[in-house]
Image (tube, grey):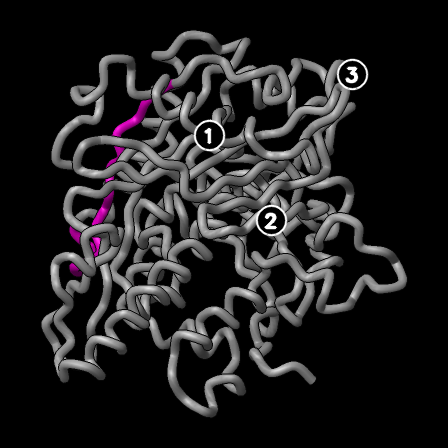
Amino acid sequence: MSSSPQNAAEKPWGDKVAETVLSVYSSLPKKGKPQGREVTVLAAFLLSNPSQELQVVAMGTGTKCIGRTRLSFNGDVVNDSHAEVIARRSLLRYFYTEIDCITKKYRNHSHNSGGMVLQCDDMANSIFQPRSDKPGQEKFGLTPGWQLHLYVSQLPCGEASLNSHMFTSLSSPAAEIPNTEYVPSEYSSRANVTGTVQRKPGRGDTTLSVSCSDKIARWSVVGVQGALLSCFMEPVYISSITVGLSQFDSASSLTANHLTRFLHERIISLSDKLVEPFQVSKPLLYVAPVPPKEFKHSQTALETLTCGYSICWNKSGLHEVILGTTGRKQGTSAKGAMSPSTESSLCKRRLLELFVSLKEGSRITEITYSELKGWAEEYNVASRAFKASPHFRNWLLKPQNLESFSCKRH
């Protein structure tokens, strides 16, 4: 990050980020929001322009994920409905929409003028600009001066919150049974060790999802865009992370220490193992005021209940609600549980459809999701380096054929 956003705002940056996010959240209808004693977690991605003006572009809520017995080999369910993951997947759809818009402008301009260069006026309001001078290999990157920011209403689950009061409250016997042991690929159980990959908690049925702390650390190495979008764009890194203070751990220095440990300290060893455009990103860390009541988790599960729904929203028009324990849209009936109409816009199959719509080729609909991810060679090299590093070599591997589906429906 070229300069601290703190210098560009009269009020503290964390306060400004939180107010911007909560304003958008408050404008949404109550469908999917906590009711009564229910609480949830809120996460959002924001973009800032060269003038440091903030806009929320993607948002998610939620605390649930599905167990291994509910995993689908068709890519039609959302495995992890934690707020940070929902917000990031909503961000991916926003990126796809923006790239589709730019690509169409390029095609129209190329058809009319025989060239690929757009006029300044055409790109003035775009968050992406072409970054490659290699014919036929044009990739997009964030427009210079634009930056991506992450807000989370509390410390992310996993390493970031292991020693906080919040981790104790979420791990109480009356709450969901936690499973935060070492996470080897063969799914064996070991004692929890600080600094290693953590498994997300589940109720009885063990999950195969790693913690949000670990996922955010990964985004700081390979970018938030993932493998498929890496075929169209350079890695996009988070410039700052803002976390809401806990009503129990109200010291901002304590929260900052948790953030530094789970993020910076665990990935610094990768600095000399990555090849451009990939890098070890060290986002600036900020704290925000204690969030509103519906995001305040109590010290015991007797006082509050975790909301089972996840709100998915982005600036491009996405707004739906997922039931986190099924990974499908809210309101799905048992009779039509497997119908395509119950699929969330954030499931892998729907994201694959967006990828295919941008990629030209008649046979692409028959190529599997896993094979298409393999096309992003540079991304995969960076991802392997990340998973080979000391703190992440126990990254949880899911069944190999879990991503063997294609865009073509049978």
Residue 283 part of the magenta segment: yes
Q: Residues within 10 Å of mark 1 (few under 14, many from 20)?
A: many
Image quadrant occupied by the N terminus? top left
- Classify residue 235 as left or right of residue 208: left
State the residue in front, 155 or 144: 144
| SS for callout 2 | strand
- Residue 17 is marked as none
Is the C terminus in the top left, top right, bottom left or bottom right quadrant? bottom right
Q: Which residues are magenta?
A: 272-287
Looking at the picture, how far across and down is residue 277, in whole percent?
18, 58
Coordinates of residue 93 in the picture (x, y in percent): 46, 57
Q: Which mark is residue 302?
A: 3
**Residue drawn at (63%, 54%), measured in percent from left and top?**
79
Residue marked by disc 1: 152
State which quadrant residue 260 falls in.
top left
Find disc 2 in the rendering and name its residue: 80
CB-based contact (under 8 Å), mark 3 and mark 2: no
